[in-house]
Amino acid sequence: MEDFDTLAQERRARLAAERLLELKQAELYEANRKLSKHALSLSGEIIEKRQEAEHLKVENSRARKDLDKANSAIVIAERRLWDSLETIQDGFAVFDPSDTMIAANSAYLRVFDDLEDVKPGISYSDIVRLAVEEGIIDIGDMSREAYIEAALTRWRAATREPQTVRLWNNQYVKLVDRRSRDGDMVSLGLNITGTIRYEERLKKARYKAESANRAKSAFLANMSHEIRTPMNGMVGMADLLAETGLDKEQRLFVETIKSSGTALLNLINDVLDYSKIEASKLVLNPEVFDLEKCIHDVIVLLQPNAAQKGLSLIIDYDMFLPTRFVGDPGRMRQVLTNLIGNAVKFTHEGHVIVRVVGVPEKGGLSQRVHVSVEDTGIGIPKGFENHIFGEFNQVEDDRNRKFEGTGLGLAITRELVQLMGGEIWVDSVEGEGSCFGFCMSMDVVGESADNRAPAWIKDIVVVESVEAHADILSKQLAALGIKATIFADAKSVLENPPAVQAYLISQRLEDLDIEEVIAALKAAEVKAGILVMAAGMGMKAPDIPDVHVVHRPLVRAELCCALAALETVEISALPPLVLEGPQMPDAAKETGPRRMRILAAEDNKTNQLVFGKMVKALDVELVFANNGQEAIDLYQSFDPDLVFMDISMPEVDGKEATRTIREIEAQTGRHVPVVAMTAHAMTGDEEEILSHGLDHYMTKPLRKAAIIDRILMEHPAECKPVAPMDDDAPSAVDAVVREAMAEATQIGG
Ligand code: ADP
């Protein structure tokens, strides 16, 4: 039993061991399976990692290659950059934010020559200090410390302007310093020696050119003076000679001398004007002037030429446009004379119309005035419109070159218009005509006393058969405060002549002749002034005693003047009269007021002679002073009403004499007009001369018309009229007209 138990126990033990073995084998198997699975996954990972490593290796070698490439590219770029910086002549340096030099090109370092310390690593302040102490930079009058301080202040400023420095070797360097975004300072030293030298040369050349120009102006001034003085004698004497008894041939010679002399003077004036404009010496003298009258004056002057050709000269001045402006009347007249003169010159038949219109500006304080001069002449070929405005330029064809001229007129005109702030243009059709126009802005001035009708005229009868004329007239008169009653024909007026202060009658009426109308009015004992509107300036005006004539086109100022003159008709019957002109009753000459006293200071005997002859026709007392001192003495003893004063006289000149006269007058409160007579015709001369107390200015050669005009203007009311004493002598008015005609023949030529 025991054995059985033992056997059973052993069997049980063996079975248990066998089960355990089985279990352990199963565990081992499981462990082996896991192990082999793990080994398998590990070997997969290893392969992956190996592949990754392989890939990384490839990547790495590519990156290294790229890096090498990039490095060599950087090296090349850097080398190129430095090669470039080295090749430029200008200095280049870079400083870090602490102002230490990082790099500089040789051009920069070369300035410091042998100074070993100047190299990358040096501070900017040390560079400046060395440059100053070693005398590399020319510090001018500044002390070293001040210069260094100023240079460093500039360097540290938030922004800095380029600075030019002069080096010891006379080279100029322009320092341009810019801070970069990361705080570095890039410093350029530009060598501008060439530019500076060029500028110096330019400055010298400009100075030379300016001196030459000044010399030219002075030469021109002197020449004009020198030429005008003898011309004074020539033209003046020829003028006087023309008034003596001459046979036909002699008269022709004298007239030729006169017209050639005047033409020469015009030429001198043109050249002088052009040179003055060129040298920017021409200045405008703005003053209040009447544009309508200015155009009218030019037309009157050109009328004889136009009349000779049968041309009508017409002014179409916009009725609502003011007439008084601020501008330079002399220069405006010159522009108009040139354009209208040319229009007359280049037109054989037809008309020349001057039209003036304006556009208000600045609320009516100023006007943009447009003036056009329209002709029916030869016209300008296509393509020449700009050419003719050039100096000495003309249209060179058969038709044109029959006309005299210098080709300077339009060049001067254009410059003058531009100087006045305006523009000029031309429209033309060859063979049909031309229209030259200009426009400019001018300030408007209120109407003058000249443009006012006499207060005693309230009602006027207008006899005018052309409705348009009648309409314009009644508007013009209404603007003057006069009520106009219009009659289209004379007969209805004569049936029952209204009681008005004046009759304004057209020369051309449909029903009756003007002479008949006036005779009828006189027969009806109409107590009114009679004013006849002559048909046109080309047409012979009626010559009827006691009847005033006013010419068409009617200029407002002229109309007012003519209306004012009607007064003299009223009072002409009451002796003794103070009337100008030949209407003066003879008796008044003996017993009437004293003669006007004129003092002329002139040291040159020829000029005295010419002056004396020029005013010979006038009934005035003329005394000559041979120098300024005599003029002062005679001013006190002779008590003149008007003084003509030569400026260049020995010892006391005209300016000093006038100053003394004005001092004397300061005690008496009188003011005698003093007119300068001078050959100095450059710009600025007039202002300078007038600043010595003279009132007016005349350039030599003196024009008889201008002298007579001035005498008539200054004629005191209490003096005898200055009209001629004897009926055979040419009247002052005639003389003026003849003179004007002589001038007119030269206009535009
Ligand atoms: P000038 O009249 O002295 O020759 P301008 O400068 O005044 O000089 O004129 C230049 C040229 O322009 C004239 O020679 C002429 O050929 C041309 N010209 C000017 N005005 C007119 C015009 N109204 N009609 C035709 N041609 C003209």
Image (cartoon, rainbow, N blue to C red):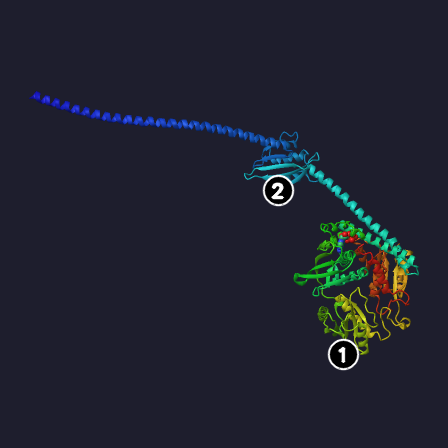
Looking at the rendered structure, the kind of residue marked 2 is: Arg
Quarter location, residue 148: top right
- Is the residue marked by circle 2 packed among few (<14), some (14-19), or many (20+) residues within 10 Å? some
Residues at marks 1 and 2, CA–CA distance in whole angstroms: 96 Å
- For the residue pair 312 and 355, the one nearer the viewer reads as 312
Q: Is mark 2 on a helix, strand or loop?
A: loop
- Is the residue marked by circle 1 packed among few (<14), some (14-19), or many (20+) residues within 10 Å? few
Q: Does any portion of residue 342 appear in the rendered image?
A: yes
Where does residue 20 sit, x and y in percent of width and height? 18, 25
**The furthest residue to the left:** 1
- For the residue pair 115 and 273, the one nearer the viewer reads as 273
Q: Which label sits on residue 269? A: none
Where does residue 405 sit, x and y in percent of width and height? 80, 52
Tell me: is circle 1 under 8 Å from ligand 1. no
Where does residue 620 sit, x and y in percent of width and height? 89, 65
The residue labelled by disc 2 is 160
Residue at the image position 59 percent from the left and 31 percent from the top: 82
Residue at the image position 12 percent from the left and 22 percent from the top: 11
372 to 65, vertically: above or below: below
127 to 367, vertically: above or below: above
Q: What element carries label 1?
A: helix
The residue labelled by disc 1 is 495
Q: Which of the marked residues, 1 or 2, is nearer the chain's N terminus?
A: 2
- For the residue pair 424 and 281, the one nearer the viewer reads as 424
643 to 14, vertically: above or below: below
Residue at the image position 66 percent from the left and 30 percent from the top: 113
Looking at the rendered structure, the kind of residue marked 1 is: Glu
